Image (cartoon, rainbow, N blue to C red):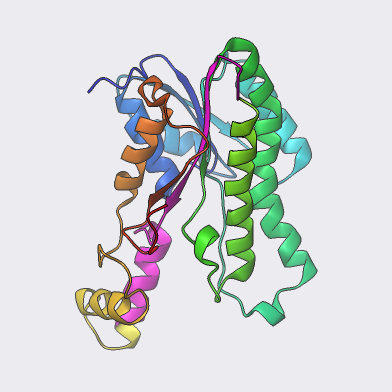
Amino acid sequence: MDLKLDGKLVFISGSTKGIGRAIAEVVLQEGARVIINGRSDTATVASEMSGPGEVIAIEGDLARPEEAERICTEIDSHGELDVLVNNMGIFNPHPFADISDDEWRYFFDVNVLSSVRLCRHFFPKMLERDFGRIINISSEAGMRGLESMVHYSVSKGAQIVLGRGLANLTKGSGADITVNSVLPGPTMTAGVSNWLAESAQVQGKTEAQFVREFFKETEPDSLLQRFIEPEEIASVVAFIASPRSSAINGASIKAEGGLIKSIV
């Protein structure tokens, strides 16, 4: 299927590794002009990508207001933005009672306000143009409320509500603008891969054995019973970014391997 992304300008925050990089590589293969972003090594990562589309590197930290403003200006210099993917995010297991105000603020700066700043700049422009796609890469944690990472879960829940709120603002506009959230489950990023190898070694198990026991004991509700590959999430995002997805708006799209026992 032709996703009609050829020539579309796509910005993906936090896209030098993990799910963000996978999204960049998939839409690049669809012929998009892809702007990748990270706090470091962004130009190096861009040089490693190839495809029929174009790769542009914009380095900077969207958790900092002044940096976010500069990044938005640089994006504008490359043309009208068609697709905004709010992927930048952090997580850190921490007992709830030990999470300080400063850590709460930092999680909201990175996971929520980075998205808010980008949306505040580009959403009105999309309304003026009568076209645009905004996709928040949230998490199933935003619906489940993980006890090991309450602050992370709250921030991801906020992202989902942000997406729905902006989608509501498109009502009756007649424009082809959609705002959706994608909710990945446990995904095999580089960080997870390192944690997996170290944990298996400490427990004297093979990685395959550790994974089987992890899902059996920690995530028994998973229907997939394995880690999701970043490319699997990227394929979902590429379709939502496509002009072909215009009927999907204000949705929380679960790509979590069946962890959430819900039909809505």
In the shown orientation, is residue 129 left or right of residue 32? right
**Residue 159, how many percent across, how many down?**
60, 48
**Residue 107, how many percent across, how many down?**
67, 58
In the shown orientation, is residue 62 left or right of residue 196? right
Query: In the picture shown, does residue 125 fall above or below 89?
Result: above
Residue sitting nearer the eye, 195 or 220: 220
**Residue 203, how many percent across, how many down?**
31, 88
Q: Quadrant of residue 224?
A: bottom left
Residue sitting nearer the eye, 231 or 199: 231
Query: In the picture shown, does residue 126 fall above or below 147?
Result: above
**Residue 110, how many percent across, how many down?**
65, 51
Query: In the picture shown, does residue 93 fall above or below 152?
Result: below
Residue sitting nearer the eye, 203 or 128: 128
Q: Which residues are magenta?
A: 171-200
Please state the total of marks drawn on the protein image.
0
Q: Quadrant where the N terminus lies?
A: top left
The residue shown at (79%, 68%) is 101
In the shown orientation, is residue 179 left or right of residue 119? left
